Every structure is written in C-alpha cells, then in structure tokens.
C-alpha cells in the first residue's frame, strides 16, 4: 500500500476486518516488523485520538514514532506552488517533504480542508505533495476530503456490534457552531457503500455531499423517517459542499436525542469525537448503554495498526 486515503486502498474488506480482529487480539505479535523503522506523524491541525492512537499503533508494531506539529514546533510551511514567499512562512512543503521523507519509513499527515477553496481541498493538494515528493508510503490522518483511519475503525465497530447480517446504518447531519470539513462523512459514506450494510444519509437541504462519495447511498431529508428501524446511528456535523464551507443551518431539532432514537431498532449511537454535547447529541443518548463512542475511539489503534502493518510488510 503506497498511500491510504480510500476504501479501495485497503483491498478486500472482509480480509481487512479479519486482519483487524487478529491485530486486536494479539497487538504485539508483529514487533519484529517495525524494528528500526520510524513513522513521522505530521499535524497541521489539532488532534487527540489520531495523534495518540497512531503513536500507540506504531509502538505495538515495534516502531519509533516522531510527531511534528507544523505551525507550533516547526517553521510554518507554505503549501501553494508558485507564490512569492514574502509572508509569514519561511519554508515550502517542496523542501520540507523530501527532508521529512529522508528521516523515516512511513509518513502520516493531518491537513484539514481549509474550506476556502473547494478545488484546493478536493484535489488533496497537500497530501498529494507528500505522496509525490516524500518517496515514502503516506497515510491520511484526515486530509482535504477523507479520514480513512476513522472510517475503518467505524466499520470494525459496526462489525463487532451488529446482530443482523445486514444492519441498517444511518448517518445524520447534526448542528454545530463552527464550519467543519466533509472528510469524516465522505469517508464514512465511502466505506459504508463498500460494506454489506443498508446505508442511509439524512441531512437538511443544502448539505448534500460530493456525489462521488454519496454513491449509491439513499438520501432521506426527513430525519425521523431515516431513523426508522436503524441499527446504528452515526452523527456528524459538516459544512455545505455545494455552498462550499458555509453553515446553512443551526437547527437543534437535528440534535440526536431520545425522540429520534425511540423510532430506531434500539440503535447503537456512534460519533468519531470530539463531540459537542447537546449540540450534536444529548447527554441522555451519549451516556446511554447504547453509545459506542469509546469503543469506537479505541478501535482507532487497530485501524492504524493494520494500515501501518501492511505498509511495513510492503517495504520489508
Ligand atoms: C474535525 C472534523 O469535523 O473534521 C475532526 C474530526 C475527527 N472536528 C472538529 O474540528 C471539531
Ligand atoms: N476522531 C478523531 O480523529 O479525533 P482527533 O481529531 O482527536 O484526532
């Protein structure tokens, strides 16, 4: 695997899930694989889970992990090509990336969508430069359009908790005070479309995602109707893709509460975290025994470890 952005990068999903279960059962069985190998994890944005779970995954594989917070610890990096660098950024990605590549074996990059320029974000302009100029395998740790480590962990969590062979999974938009990227819902949709689930997306008008990610998913604008009979409810806020980066609604009727959960098939509640309580989901639902947010976050170590393990196997 030269890069990890999309569901097709992981290949057969059944095999990937079986491998995830083996990794989860015996996390230290591949310590030799990572011996004397180094992963550098680059963060252009904040993180709790991705930073810690990626480091833990690397340690489980016997690897060294180095974390760099761009904008905090290093020189500020220019990301646009062809600009006169007379501003506040003393170094360009074009030099920084091959330098980083020369110090490590794998690279992980978190570079959120800026939500200013849809083409810049949806061309994965920053991650593509890491792929093109580092000479090393690159993992998206949430980049312009995708968050694949999250979606893989989400799929594993659904696999572990489902009680029917083809569960109904509903992804719902929920309100949030700030504009957020579409990466999490894009990846979740991409992975659910590839998995054996009945997948429904619900959101207010204007929050349609990129059709390339929506694919064959059913879109239902009536949230209560969408929730009927659901086995899993996956809540997330995102800003508009069509009116790029805009907040079109703050309607708290969309906050996931008991009213909506009551029409489901006693659904499990999921969210990638961080979550704003009583905006995205009520305390009652997130604190209920049906909430999977903590085991879901714990599975981030497993998904990251499978991806790093496969990359290490390729470069042995
Ligand atoms: C980010 C987002 O929505 O993309 C990260 C989620 C994993 N969330 C926030 O910035 C709150
Ligand atoms: N879910 C997730 O990626 O969380 P962080 O932003 O804390 O890494």
Image (spheres, rainbow, N blue to C red):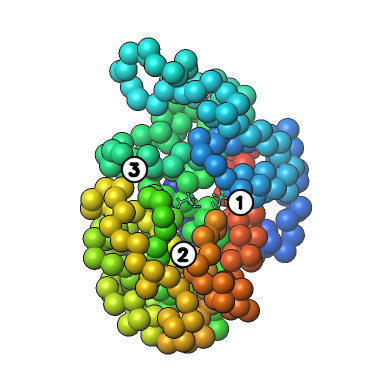
Q: Nearer the viewer, mark 1 or mark 3?
A: 3
Q: Residue at label 3?
A: 115
Could you tell whether 124 is left or right of 99 in the image? left
Decide: is 107 above or below 254. Answer: above
Depth check, mark 2 against mark 3: the one in front is: 2
Q: Is mark 1 within 8 Å of ligand 2?
A: yes
Image-quadrant location for residue 252: bottom left
Q: Kindly identify the residue that appears in the image at 27 percent across and 73 percent down.
A: 221
Is disc 3 placed on a helix, strand or loop? loop
| Mark 1 surroundings: few (<14), some (14-19) or many (≥20) residues within 10 A | some
Q: Determine if residue 18 is in view.
A: no
Q: Earlier in the sequence, mark 1 or mark 2?
A: 1
Where residue 133 appears, as percent x and y from the top left, is: 45, 26
Tell me how far mark 1 sits from mark 3, CA to CA: 22 Å
- Could you tell me residue 268's position as x and y percent? 53, 77
- Looking at the rendering, which quadrant does residue 25 occupy? bottom right
Q: Quadrant of the C terminus?
A: top right
- For the question of whether residue 223 can be seen, the reply is yes
What mark, if any, has residue 49 been given in the picture?
1
Q: Nearer the viewer, residue 76 or 28?
A: 76
> Of marks 2 and 3, which one's residue comes earlier in the chain?
3
Task: From the viewer's side, name the closer residue of 101 and 53.
Answer: 53
Secondary structure beneath label 2: loop
Task: Report whether 220 appears left or right of 87.
Answer: left
């Amino acid at each position: 695997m030269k890069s990890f952005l999309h569901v097709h990068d992981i290949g057969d999903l059944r095999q990937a899930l079986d491998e995830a279960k083996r990794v989860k059962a015996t996390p230290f069985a591949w310590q030799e694989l990572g011996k004397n190998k180094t992963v550098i994890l680059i963060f252009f944005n904040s993180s709790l889970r991705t930073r810690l779970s990626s480091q833990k995954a690397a340690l489980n594989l016997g690897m060294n992990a180095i974390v760099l917070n761009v904008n905090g610890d290093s020189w500020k990096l220019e990301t646009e090509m062809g600009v006169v660098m007379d501003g506040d950024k003393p170094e360009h990605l074009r030099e920084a990336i091959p330098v980083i590549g020369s110090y490590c074996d794998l690279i992980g990059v978190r570079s959120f969508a800026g939500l200013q320029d849809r083409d810049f974000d949806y061309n994965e302009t920053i991650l593509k430069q890491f792929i093109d100029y580092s000479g090393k395998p690159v993992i998206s740790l949430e980049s312009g359009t995708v968050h694949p480590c999250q979606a893989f962990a989400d799929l594993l969590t659904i696999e572990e908790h489902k009680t029917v062979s083809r569960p109904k999974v509903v992804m719902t938009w929920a309100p949030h005070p700030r504009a957020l990227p579409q990466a999490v819902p894009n990846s979740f949709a991409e992975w659910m479309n590839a998995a054996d689930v009945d997948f429904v997306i619900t959101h207010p008008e204007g929050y349609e995602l990129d059709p390339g990610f929506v694919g064959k998913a059913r879109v239902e604008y009536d949230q209560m109707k969408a929730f009927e009979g659901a086995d899993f409810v996956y809540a997330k806020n995102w800003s508009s893709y069509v009116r790029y980066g805009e907040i079109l609604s703050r309607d708290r009727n969309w906050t996931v509460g008991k009213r909506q959960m009551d029409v489901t098939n006693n659904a499990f509640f999921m969210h990638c975290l961080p979550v704003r309580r009583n905006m995205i989901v009520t305390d009652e639902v997130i604190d209920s025994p049906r909430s999977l947010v903590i085991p879901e976050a714990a599975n981030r170590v497993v998904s990251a470890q499978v991806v790093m393990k496969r990359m290490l196997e390729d470069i042995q």
